[in-house]
Image: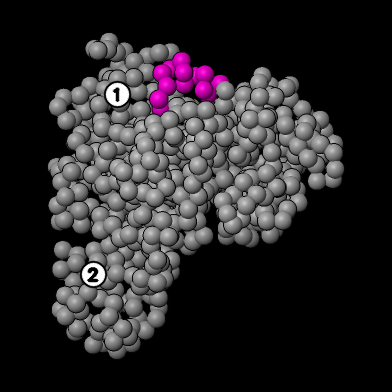
Amino acid sequence: MAYQVDEELEAEIAVIGGGTGGTAAALRAARLGHSVILTEETDWIGGQLTAQGVSALDEHRFIEQFGGTATYYELREGIRQYYRTHYRLTPEAAASPHLNPGNGWVSRLCFEPRVGVEVLRQMLAPSVEAGKARILLETVPVAAETKGDRIEAIVVRGPDNRLTRIRAAFFLDATELGDLLPLAGVEHVVGAESREETGEPDAPEEANPEWAQSFTFPFAVELCPGGDFTIPRPEGYEHFRETQPYTFTVDYLPPRGSVTYRMFDTAPGASGPFWTYRRLIDRGNFDDPAFPNDIAMINWPGNDYAGGNLANRDAAGRAEMLRQGRLLSLGFLYWLQTEAPRDDGGTGYPELRLRPDIMGTAHGLSKYPYIREARRIRALKTVAQTEIAADSNPGARAVFFPDSVGIGLYGIDIHACAGNQPQVILGTRPFQIPLGALIPIRVENLLAAAKNIGTTHITNGAYRLHPVEWNIGEAAGALAAYCLSTGTLPHRVATIEEEQRQFQRLLVACGVPLYWYEDVPLSHPAFAAVQWLAATGAWPGHPEHLRFDPDAPLDPDELVNELPREVSARLVTLHEQPGLTRAEFALRLAEEESFLA
């Protein structure tokens, strides 16, 4: 279908979808000097950490020291600095280098979504002002123009139904549901693959396109003691209350079993109270009239909508599913206000006041649902359960990917799916993001830049979280920039070792870790050397722990066992100088032409 458009735009890179991954992709590509157009369906960039309301970051135990990219840490520090600058903190909060405005127990950084949006805008502002980045809000893709194995243009619909044709050398799909894939005829998967296809122990026997993780409309409430802010009973309340059901009880897998949470007290077997689970503002952190009370974000099994796969619906079907999802969340709020068991006896917490301003909407729910699973490309590499699951990897790390473009750590966490798929919760080892997972098997100039990479339905449950999606997007933006600068294509970078190593050097220089070491942070002088040596296999990490021990004295005898034979045989003279630390030796080793040339 030929579209009559109102405007033609051109850039070197078009990032379609301004969520967590898309924003990171645009930021990195622009900072590498390339022109970028970034589109976003809502009026807030940032995706799951802003417009989707999940501004309590799902991270891992190492995150304050290691495990994110330099730009991800820039985002985290920007959020903390915003609160330090704009509000009066208590002395204790002001003195904390790891300020957590909400002190939610599930996350080391909980904040208001609007603050995340503002910090992201500030991060992109220099590129926008320099003309390197252009952001088109309230804009969605409606068509793709292709020729052979290439995309030539994407047509998008913006405000007032204006159509714009965007031409670019590279297109990055960072939409929340992988919407470019069917538009451009990119081979992809929807829902759950079969066990026969993936070889995964927890995959279903038969593929099921409806088995995609539930989506959620989070909302924010303020605790106003003595008040009554009960909302009108939503449509379908009784149905959702009984079938969801609305409850404080969570059924975990054995041996933990069922845990019934309490609103403000910590129940037996619980990690903390329901209220502080994803609290965004802890009034105890502030000596400021802007925050007289606590504010919490509600994202709970009670408002997970598991009525089907949004990616499989037409426009009318998707709109109805979203309407039902909103009613589900409003019903959960009504249950909290009227029927939830109180810690002090009785039922209902009418003092919970819905805060539409926190989410930036009239209805009080997030602008866009929290999307856990999208369409996924048929990629050069698809990550399988056995490559990252703890029960399949007895060492300290998951399977080593020599083409790593980043790292992550989160359990395989499959929320309720349509059709009553069994819950899947599995521990993982610290894992990597393989370059091949970003690249489609056929299309030359499209890259996956969000939750649509080459994972399975099972492993998507570990690769979908904030720092991992950010890293995926940043790596995709860097790959497009690298290909433009070198005149090559992603498939060549993935298959030619010399190209792959050159690209990995660029990532390390940008502050993107490729390998898991908990004790060599980005700020360490040997970070780049240690990362490069590990990624290339020249000096792999200890199989039983995540430490490099950079300040420990170099032990030549141990070194022989740590280095591959072909490396140690050629570099015995490097440790002749006594007193070297392991980090100092890594710097010397990395300076060798054979590793850095």
Residue occupying the point 19% across, 83% down: 572
Q: Is residue 396 left or right of residue 348?
A: left
Mark 1 lies on a secondary structure that is helix
Residue 371, given in percent of the width and then of the height, sits at 47, 35
Splitting the image into 4 quarters, where does residue 451 fall? top left
Name which of mark 1 and mark 2 comes first in the sequence.
1
Magenta span has 321?
Answer: yes
Residue at 40% over, 41% down:
204
- Magenta span: predominant SS is helix
Q: What span is in magenta?
A: 311-323
Residue drawn where x is 59% and y is 49% of the image: 252
Q: Residue sitting at 68 percent across and 59 percent down?
A: 92
Label annotation for residue 183: 1
| Quadrant where the image shows the N terminus | top left
Residue 200 located left or right of residue 345: left
What mark, if any, has residue 200 been given in the picture? none
Above or below, 531 relative to 363: below
Q: Which residue is mark 2?
A: 538
